[in-house]
Image: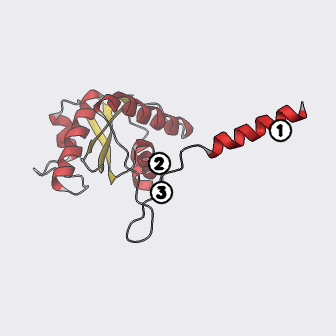
Amino acid sequence: MLRQFSVLSLCLMILTACGTPPAPVQLAADGKPLPTVYRISSADTATIQYRVLDSVNAFRRTAGKSPVALNANLNAAAATHALDMHKQNRPWHFGSDGSSPLERIGRAGYEGSLLGENISETYEGEIPTLAAWMNREDTRDVILNENATDLGISWFQEDRGKLWWVLLLAQRN
């Protein structure tokens, strides 16, 4: 029995050693590791939107707030602004036409009050981006706004991987 265990252990060690070696970490000019590109396909849209919704609602539940629902009009407004930020090459709350988040949700057909917009320019996925928003008081306050009933989330990804994220929270009429 002991001999069989020893042989089995030796075989396991050999198999482990035969595995594919990890890819070398690429370093930037400053010596820090380059960010890993998080790729999103169009087939991932619903999964990502519901993953953000579930995460936001978990944060809201912990804070004693009511859950929010995903809203197609807010998603459309977020997608439009994410693309526009990419075209402007800057993360900010104003559209290239001077529009505000309030104007954009109205154009998208949302009937309600805007409570806040969080934006981000990053190479990270939705969960690290949401975590970064939760670590800042101003963006966390948007997510945890007690009057929020609806959420919109979208992004635009450049060919090289940079992501432009937009999250909207609003209160329906």
Q: Are marks 3 and 1 in contact (CB under 8 Å)?
A: no
Counting from the top left corner in percent of width and height, residue 63 is at: 54, 41
Nearer the observer, 30 or 121: 30
Residue sitting at x 89%, y 34%: 2
User: Mark 3 = which residue?
Assistant: 24
| Element under disc 2 | helix
Quadrant where the image shows the N terminus: top right
Q: Quadrant of residue 89?
A: bottom left
Counting from the top left corner in percent of width and height, residue 20 is at: 53, 45
Q: Quadrant of residue 169?
A: top left
Numbered circle sitting on residue 6: 1
The answer to whether 106 appears left or right of 161 in the picture is left
Amino acid type of the residue that numbered disc 2 sits on in the rendered structure: Ala
User: Mark 2 = which residue?
Assistant: 131
Quadrant where the image shows the C terminus: top left
Nearer the observer, 60 or 91: 91
Crowd rating for badge 1 (residues with CA inside 10 Å; few <14, some 14–19, many 20+):
few
Nearer the observer, 106 or 11: 11
Residue sitting at x 43%, y 33%: 51
Amino acid type of the residue that numbered disc 3 sits on in the rendered structure: Pro
- Whether 32 is drawn above or below 48: the answer is below
